Image (spheres, grey):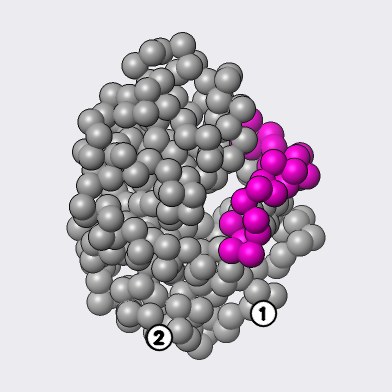
């Protein structure tokens, strides 16, 4: 598949990025090993973050929200969305034969085995559905990857921080203070993060799930916040209350994948019933 920008979608590149995330955010990894670790990353990961950090500007975030958040691209249900997302699988990729549905069910099944609440299992199932943006012409750097606030200074904990030197926002003094265009303590809901699948899916499902689930979806890629402890000066009391839930979800996002392919014939009825418990048959995308 080739995006409208001429950038090919690469399932293998996404696999490299996910492997990078799993290693970078391994709880056993010492933080002082980060610099040498990033230098050893796969070249596709380095290039991904170079493009991401150079082009995720404040203006870009506003433009993408204007383009997509009218939610007028498609009408489809949640399971249909999972099957639609399967188009992202590249059969030439030698590293995996698991589809997007398989990966989603792996994550949900892990939460189910651990006795997590039903809404939590559903969140694990759908949390990456916003990646349908790749099917609508968006390059990977505008869909996946660690997210971070735009409109204020970039925290040093953001992976490949040096790549922000190429971002046009460096020339705007409004964006170069810790709070930037925001007020301290304003709450993350009032802070614009870099554009990607997290924010998009949050907007699609925000009327249907518990607040804890919505935080998990909206901020699961915001590693500088929930993993590195950055941007606390922008948090309000609700963010402090919800942060433990985002951290609780993180292992199901990163570490639930395995080599065993789930039996969808067995799992599908359970998850279709779970979907129907929370969602209408069709949603606006």
Q: Residue 84: where, in percent of width, then height?
A: 48, 58
User: Residue 102: which quarter of the image?
Assistant: bottom right
User: Residue 255: which quarter of the image?
Assistant: bottom right
Q: Is residue 208 left or right of residue 262?
A: left
Find the magenta span and give its range: 25-51
Q: Residue 151: where, in percent of width, then height?
A: 36, 26
235, 202: nearer the viewer: 235
Q: Which residue is mark 1?
A: 260
Residue 36 inside the magenta-drawn segment = yes
Q: Residue 276: where, in percent of width, then height?
A: 28, 75
Secondary structure under the numbered disc 1 in the rendered image: loop
Q: Which mark is residue 169?
A: none
Tell me if I can see residue 18 in this picture: no
Q: Quadrant of the N terminus?
A: top right
Q: Which mark is residue 115?
A: 2
Which label's residue is closer to the chain start, 2 or 1? 2
Q: Is residue 158 above or below residue 87?
A: above
Classified by dominant secondary structure, the portion drawn in magenta counts as helix
Residue at image location 40% in from the left, 86% down from the top: 115
Q: Residue 67: where, in percent of width, then height?
A: 34, 32
């Amino acid at each position: 598949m080739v995006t409208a920008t001429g950038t090919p979608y690469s399932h293998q590149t996404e696999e490299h990025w996910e492997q990078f995330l799993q290693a970078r955010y391994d709880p056993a990894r010492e933080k002082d090993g980060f610099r040498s670790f990033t230098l050893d990353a796969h070249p596709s990961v380095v290039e991904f973050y170079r493009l991401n950090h150079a082009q995720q500007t404040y203006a870009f975030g506003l433009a993408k929200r204007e383009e997509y958040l009218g939610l007028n691209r498609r009408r489809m249900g949640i399971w249909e969305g999972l099957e639609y997302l399967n188009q992202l699988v590249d059969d030439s990729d030698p590293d995996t034969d698991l589809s997007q549905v398989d990966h989603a069910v792996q994550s949900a099944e892990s939460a189910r085995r651990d006795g997590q609440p039903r809404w939590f299992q559903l969140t694990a199932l759908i949390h990456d559905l916003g990646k349908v943006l790749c099917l609508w012409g968006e390059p990977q750097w505008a869909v996946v990857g660690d997210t971070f606030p735009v409109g204020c200074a970039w925290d040093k904990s953001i992976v490949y921080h040096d790549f922000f030197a190429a971002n046009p926002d460096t020339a705007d003094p409004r964006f170069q203070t810790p709070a930037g265009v925001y007020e301290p303590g304003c709450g993350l809901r009032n802070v614009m993060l870099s554009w990607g699948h997290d924010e998009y899916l949050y907007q699609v499902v925000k009327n249907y799930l518990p607040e804890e689930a919505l935080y998990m979806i909206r901020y699961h890629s915001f590693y500088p916040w929930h993993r590195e402890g950055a941007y606390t000066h922008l948090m309000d009391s609700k963010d402090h209350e919800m942060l433990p839930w985002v951290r609780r979800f993180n292992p199901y996002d990163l570490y639930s994948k395995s080599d065993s392919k789930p039996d969808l014939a067995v799992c599908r009825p359970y998850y279709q019933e779970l979907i129907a418990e929370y969602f209408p048959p069709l949603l606006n995308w």
